[in-house]
Amino acid sequence: MNWSILLMECVILCVLFTVIVVTISRKNPLAVVHDLPPAIGQRAQELGLIKENQRSGSRVVLVKKIAAALIIALLFAITVYCFNDARSFADGFGYSYLIWTVVNWYDALVIDCLWVCHDKRVRIPGTEDMEAYQDYLFHIKESVKGQFIGLPVCALVGVLTALFTKI
């Protein structure tokens, strides 16, 4: 295992993740309402700012997350195959799950707990007064869920990596 390559991949992905989230959140905080505590989504819906299908757990959000997971799995498989010399299911799964874990906890601790919980510029209009923005436990619980979500995604990376080896 080449730790320097793995570290570089983690740093690059955390930077890319930050750029994407910051850009989307600042441009339109409603675009990430499904990643905020449910009380904020409920208030945004009551204010007529979002529809039910934009809230966490809706079919639309679920389909978008599954599509994103499939794209992530493909990109991870290509990355670990090309840069980490992963040539088996175990290598593909292991490398990708390690990267997934780093980015997942970076999201929870840095993006969510340090930035979203404190930056008033990413608050949804009409919800600025809500204490739910400082719900650190919500973000930690979501990251624990994210670890479990990463299992099938990274298993798919393992399968794709093994398939790439046979091609």
Image (tube, rainbow, N blue to C red):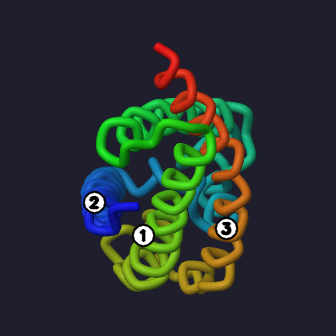
Q: Nearer the viewer, mark 2 or mark 3?
A: 2
* Residue position marked by numbered label 1 in the rendering: 123
Image location of residue 94, percent across then percent down: 57, 54
In this view, the mark in front (1 or 3): 3
Specify the amino acid type for callout 2. Answer: Ile
Q: Secondary structure at mark 3?
A: helix
| Labels 2 & 3 near each other (Cβ < 8 A) | no
Tell which of 11 and 166 is nearer to you.
166
Instruction: Please name which of the two marks, 1 or 2, marks the residue nearer to the observer.
Output: 2
Label 2 or label 3, whichever comes before in sequence order: 2
Residue 31, percent from left and from top: 45, 48
Considering only vertical position in the picture, is 105 above or below 35? below
Going by the numbered disc 3, the residue's amino acid type is: Glu
Q: 94 or 126, which lies in front?
A: 94
- Which of the 4 quarters of the picture holds residue 37? bottom right
Tell me if 147 is positioned left or right of 127 in this view: right
Residue 160 x/y as whole percent: 55, 28
Note whether residue 26 is visible: no
Q: Which residue is mark 2?
A: 5
Q: Residue at x 63, y 69 (%)?
A: 143
Q: Secondary structure at mark 2?
A: helix
Residue identified by numbered label 3: 142
